[in-house]
Amino acid sequence: MTLVPLPALMIEPLVRAALLEDLGLGGDITSDATIPPGTLAAASLVAREAGVLAGLDAALLAFHLLDPEVSIRVEKRDGDALAPGTAIALISGDARAILSAERTALNLLCHLSGIATATAAFVSAIGDAACTIAETRKTTPGLRALEKYAIRAGGGANHRFRLDDAILIKDNHIAVAGGIGPAIDAAAARAGHLMNIQIEVDTLAQLDEVLERVGLVGAVLLDNFALDDLREAVRRVDGRLIVEASGGVRLETVAAIAATGVDVISSGALTHSARALDIGLDITTG
């Protein structure tokens, strides 16, 4: 699948806010004090370890916002595999601007590449299984669009983006609504013809209740099911619903979960716990 970049209109407010947070009220007083005005420099974004690249547009925008005349030569693209020592992009322009943008650019690039790398590891682990790896809404406030983009860069797919994307009936909804049947019936009465309904279940008995209303629901989320129960759930559904497994998914367990026949495996850890990929900025000339 072709990775479609996010529009600059979506990225710029996020990068601008990150720069403003870092510059504070006085700007980069270290660079201003140590580097004469008009000094030019060249630098290279370099991978320190193996991984998958994501967030390059956001990172490079940090330099552009501080120096509109900055020159950038891109060597790698989002979704590309990186080896230690790989040059990602070459940047030249005002030295003060490059150093002032450095931390914002690297914070975004390392974080998003870490998400892409973790996702790619999950995708690789399940091999040829007919299953999709997805994230959840457990994202960093303000960075959801970028983090979900990084999932795609790593070869995964996206769950719903917001509360208004789709109806997802979870355990607390069921408790307040008075049960699975009433919750599904109420959701189906509210949903438009293009609105998908998914419901989370904790047991096979709850799944059987859902299957009684299979025409009203498009997908079922099996929360923290054991492997044997996942296989049995897939058998009972028999292709009538999209089957998603979630809860406690780890790199060490994702292949076994995929082998049960579920259609989707979602993991919040891909966004909330992915380790940042080590990428640095090296000054190459002054």
Image: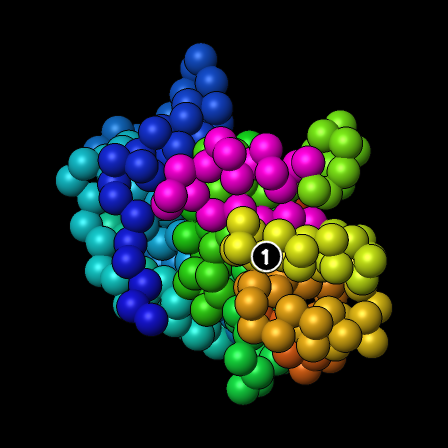
What range is drawn magenta here? 182-200
Q: Secondary structure at mark 1?
A: helix
Along the viewing direction, whichever of 20 and 224 lies nearer the viewer: 224
Q: Residues within 10 Å of mark 1 (few under 14, many from 20)?
A: some
Taking the spot 39% from the left edge, 71% from the top edge, the residue there is 80
- Would you identify the image quadrant in which residue 35 lies? top left
Q: Which residue is mark 1?
A: 214
Along the viewing direction, whichever of 64 and 80 lies nearer the viewer: 80
Question: The N terminus is located in which quarter?
Answer: bottom left
Taking the spot 54% from the left edge, 49% from the top edge, the residue there is 216
Percent x, y of residue 17: 41, 26
- Would you identify the image quadrant in which residue 115 lies? bottom right
| Image label count | 1
Residue farthest toward the left in the current orientation of the protein: 69
Query: Is the residue 60 above or below the residue 4 in the image?
Result: above
**Residue 35 falls left or right of residue 68:** right
Magenta run includes residue 61: no
**Residue 281 falls left or right of residue 225:** left
Query: Is the residue 250 above or below the residue 23 in the image?
Result: below
Percent x, y of residue 3: 32, 63
Taking the spot 33% from the left edge, 39% from the top edge, the residue there is 11
Residue 272 visible here? yes
Along the viewing direction, whichever of 180 and 94 lies nearer the viewer: 180
